[in-house]
Amino acid sequence: MRIGHGYDVHRLVPDRKLIIGGVEIPYEKGLLGHSDADVLVHAIMDSILGALAIGDIGKLFPDTSKEYEGADSLILLKQVTDLINDKGFEIGNIDSTIIAQAPKLSPYIQTMRENIANVCNTDISNISVKATTEEKLGFTGELLGISAHAVCILKNKF
């Protein structure tokens, strides 16, 4: 088994879509980033890449590359999932937490889990997505940004 941890954060800004876990969430602001800024999927990708000990998403998908400008993070996650398979592993489980004061994310969590499970080619029972606030403390509590943590276990296929 291999264990990895991922963390990501993006600033909330006007005139951007808010996409988390591959779900477009109605909100007055969105996350700023080179790609679609899907903070949850980015944290999950970093947890997987960490478990494989092959760097992070900045190394694999540099924000200096036009190729990834506006990219759908679920498509990037598919590329990371292909690396898991190439290295002889499969998802054991992924546990993730989104930290956001607003908007309320609970109505979207099941769809996020489904999106991630489908792209990672694993059963939805292996994917946990939770959301919490920081009780109005810090940059997330002050509505300046959204962050996410993720851990994953990769199992050897053999």
Image: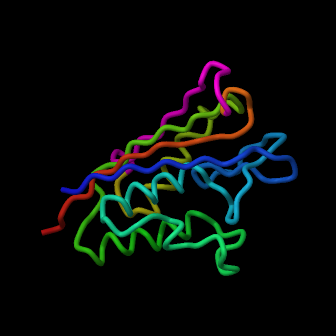
Percent x, y for residue 7? 49, 48
Residue nearest the observer in this picture, 16 or 22? 16
Q: Residue at x 55, y 72 (%)?
A: 61
**As drawn, is 93 to the left or to the right of 111?**
left
Q: Residue 128 in magenta? A: yes
Residue nearest the observer in this picture, 147 or 18? 147
Q: Residue at x 33, y 48 (%)?
A: 126
Q: What segment is highlighted magenta in the picture?
A: 124-139
**As drawn, is 67 to the left or to the right of 42?**
right
**As drawn, is 3 to the left or to the right of 28?**
left
Q: Residue 136 in magenta? A: yes
In this rendering, the answer to whether 31 lies above or below 130 is: below
In this rendering, the answer to whether 100 lies above or below 36 is: above
In which quadrant is the C terminus drawn? bottom left
In this rendering, the answer to whether 28 lies above or below 33 is: above
Please tell me in which quadrant of the rendered image residue 36 appears.
bottom right
Percent x, y for residue 2? 23, 56
Q: Residue at x 59, y 24 (%)?
A: 134
Percent x, y for residue 109? 55, 39
The colour style of the image is rainbow
Residue nearest the observer in this picture, 50 or 156? 50
